[in-house]
Structures are given as C-alpha cells and as structure tokens.
Amino acid sequence: MSNLRSLFFIIFIVFAIGCEPNPFAKGALVYKNMCASCHMDDGSGLGGNIPSLNNNLLYKDMELLTCTIVKGRVNLENRSLAMPAFDQLTDIELANLINFLSHQFGDDKQYLLNDVSKFKSGCTE
C-alpha cells in the first residue's frame, strides 16, 4: 500500500511540475527573442516606422499574420525598415507566437498547431 501511495505521489508531482502555469510563456519567449527589439516589449512599435501590434488589423486575418511572420514584409516607405522573414521558426514556435500575440495584443482567439501549419503552407512568395 505504501508503494502505491508513493507511486501516485510521484505521478502527481511529475504532472504538477510539467503543467505550464502560463500557457503563453513559450510564445512570449519567442516574441522577446525575435520581435520585441523592433515592436517593443509592449507591442507599441516605433512610431510610423515599425507598426504597433496593439489592436492591429492583422489579427482579423490569421493567415496574413502567419505569412507576414514567415515571409517578412517590405516597408514601402522605408525599405531599410523591412520586417525580416522568420521562416526558421518551427510550426510549434510559430503557433506559440501567434497565440501569444493574439492573447497579448489581439482578440485572444486561440489557434491550434494544425491551423497554423495550414496557414503557413498557404504562404506564397
């Protein structure tokens, strides 16, 4: 009986430690490492040069947001401020980032890995 209790206790601890208290933590880390240097920690951007991510229209079209992240975007007014492509992100990193962006700055709609993978595969040059 003591062994059974020990086993249940160990299983409980493993699951308790393994559960992420912040479901957006991994997306926040990707944002901090890949996006915040231009879009700022608070998503405010840099005036007219780098757009704010707060209430941005991109959240209305998640396929466009996905493709913008993966393929980058040219700033027609100042080409030296073009957004680089982040095509090195895995589908999981991309899904985590998009869900973080949506939660932090957008409409808080969440997307599954399959949705993001489908959007990514539809991106064209």
Image (tube, rainbow, N blue to C red):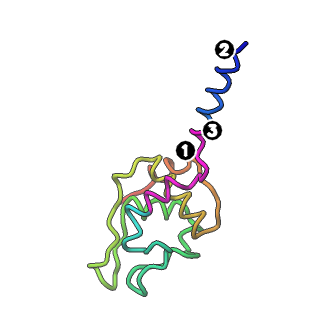
Residue denoted by label 1: 114
Check disc 1: other Cα within 10 Å, few if <14, some if 14-19, many if 20+: few
Element under disc 1: helix
As shown in the figure, which amino acid type bears the numbered disc 2?
Answer: Asn
First reached walking from the N terminus: tag 2 or tag 3: 2
State which quarter of the image contains the C terminus.
bottom left
Camera-nearest label, 2 or 1 = 2
For the point 41% across and 69% down, the residue is 36
The type of residue carrying mark 1 is Asn
- Looking at the image, do the residues carrying marks 2 and 3 touch, with CB atoms under 8 Å apart? no
Residue at the disc numbered 3: 16
Contact between marks 3 and 1 (CB within 8 A): the answer is: no
Of circles 3 and 1, which is in front? 3
Labelled disc at residue 37: none
Q: Which residue is mark 2?
A: 3
- For disc 3, the neighbor class at 10 Å (few under 14, some 14 to 19, many from 20) is few
The x and y percentages for residue 90 are 40, 47
Left/right placement of residue 77 relative to residue 1 reads left
The residue that appears at 49% across and 64% down in the rendered structure is 65
Q: Position of residue 17 (x, y in %)?
A: 58, 39
Q: Magenta: predominant secondary structure element?
A: helix
Identify the mark nearer the N-term, 3 or 1: 3
Q: CA distance from mark 2 to mark 1?
A: 41 Å
The magenta span reads 17-31
Write down the quadrant of residue 86 in the picture.
bottom left
